[in-house]
Amino acid sequence: MTAAGPRPLRIALTGGIATGKSHCAARFTALGVPLIDADQLARDVVQPGSPALAAIGALFGPHVIDVSGALDRQAIARVVFADAEARRDLEAIIHPHVYAAIERWFDGLSAPFGIADIPLLFETNRAADFDAVVVAACPSEQQLNRLRQRGLSDTDARHRLASQLPIEDKVSRADFVIDTSGSIEQTDEQVVEVWERLRARTRQEK
């Protein structure tokens, strides 16, 4: 693509916790789609010595910083998944850095389209930043079962689900839905179908 070519499509991939979004992201990457991970960006912006980590320590107290000077993720999780206001305060520190990095990444993209993997896309009211939204989804009871299989207690699993919009809400707002409730093979087939439809859209918009 030349500098005068069309702008790459900006696609967001989201879902709920334990809906198989990470698997879908890996499959898109295997198909050659450039992808940026908001969770990784969120980890990057709170590295020791960063302004974001300093702000978190000042707001939540020294107990959320471990002895090495890094963010104690378990400690902060215990706070924010039990307190919606605390979670919003944390997100207000981290999310501006994350979305600025995503914007820079898309600005430098030379592929026909790229995907930003953003778990809290709808919760942060940023869906309008993207040309299309893909949602990985499965029934909420299946989410709970998957979280229990990861070792979370029933209470912790329900707190995690309650911290996000219901998956049904996200599905209703999606441009593409990948149903991950079936087999891995069925999920992979849907990823390929969405990939093909996105490729077709980029050809149409040239």
Image (cartoon, rainbow, N blue to C red):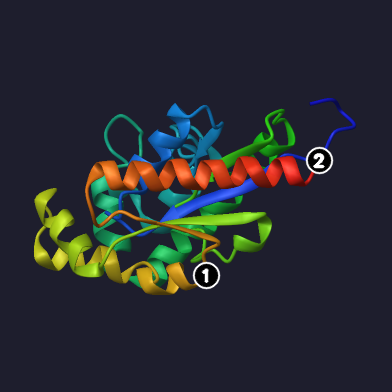
Q: Is residue 45 visible?
A: yes
Instruction: Count residues near mark 2 (Cα–Cα under 10 Å), then give few for <14, some for 14-19, many for 20+.
Output: few
Q: Quadrant of the C terminus?
A: top right
Q: Give the percent coordinates (x, y) of residue 170.
A: 45, 68
Q: Nearer the viewer, mark 2 or mark 1?
A: 2
Q: Earlier in the sequence, mark 2 or mark 1?
A: 1
Q: Give the percent coordinates (x, y) of residue 78.
A: 24, 58
Q: Is residue 100 visible?
A: no
Task: Left or right? Give the position of 44 relative to 138.
Answer: right
- Residue drawn at the location 53% of the way across and 36% of the way down: 36
Label number found at residue 152:
none
Element assignment for label 1? loop
Q: Give the percent coordinates (x, y) of residue 160.
A: 27, 63
Label 2, label 1: how far apart the Cα atoms are:
26 Å
Q: Above or below — where is 183 with respect to 165?
A: above
- Residue drawn at the location 70% of the way across and 42% of the way down: 202
Task: Left or right? Give the position of 101 relative to 118.
Answer: right
- Residue drawn at the location 40% of the way across and 48% of the way down: 190
- Judging by the rendered image, the residue that carries numbered circle 1 is 173
**189 or 69: which is nearer to us?**
189
**Residue 180, located in which quarter of the rendered image?**
bottom left
Q: Above or below — where is 107 with respect to 160?
A: above
Q: Above or below — where is 164 with respect to 190?
A: below
- Judging by the rendered image, the residue that carries numbered circle 2 is 206
Element assignment for label 2? loop
**124 or 44: which is nearer to us?**
124
Q: Amino acid at mark 1?
A: Arg
